[in-house]
Image: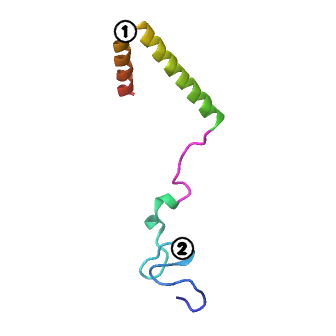
Amino acid sequence: MDQLSSRPRGRHASAGGRPAEAGGRPAPAAARSPLLTPTALRVPQITVYFWVIKGLSTAMGEATSDWSVKTLPPEVAVLIGFTGFVIA
């Protein structure tokens, strides 16, 4: 430990809580975990447009499925739906 503070010094700790190299210096940015960087999570923001598109696509999928099962023989409708799922 450093005599002026209660923080441990040396190769296992450094200022700011970052991993330290053997000489006690902070590890370079490339050695730090990419999950700790602010740009690591690139999840799109959920907006009203997201919910509108999700609702429309779900409704269209359900309507198409119902129509195809009632119009075509159920086995053929399921086979067509499964083929579309595999291609997607």
5 vs 83: above or below: below
Q: Residue at x 56, y 29 (%)?
A: 54
Residue 82: x %, y % from top left: 36, 23
Q: Does 43 appear in magenta? A: yes
Label annotation for residue 17: 2
4 vs 50: above or below: below
Q: Residue at x 51, y 54 (%)?
A: 40
Q: Residues within 10 Å of mark 2 (few under 14, many from 20)?
A: few
Q: Residue at x 45, y 79 (%)?
A: 12
Can you identify the residue that label 1 sits on? 73
Residue 22: x %, y % from top left: 41, 80
Q: Residue at x 34, y 13 (%)?
A: 76
Q: For the residues marked 1 and 2, what is the alpha-carbon distance in whole angstroms? A: 65 Å
Q: Does 35 appear in magenta? A: no
**Which label lies toward us, 1 or 2?**
1
Please indicate whether residue 74 sits to the left or right of residue 55 in the image: left
Query: In the rendered structure, which disc, 1 or 2, sits on the residue that comes first in sequence?
Result: 2
The disc labelled 2 sits on which kind of residue? Gly
| SS of the residue under disc 2 | helix
Residue lying farthest top?
Answer: 71
The disc labelled 1 sits on which kind of residue? Pro
Residue lying farthest bottom?
Answer: 3
| SS of the residue under disc 1 | loop
Q: Do residues under tags 1 and 2 come within 8 Å of each other at their CB atoms? A: no
Frontmost residue, 18 versus 74: 74
Magenta residues, start to end: 37-46
Location of the C terminus by quadrant is top left
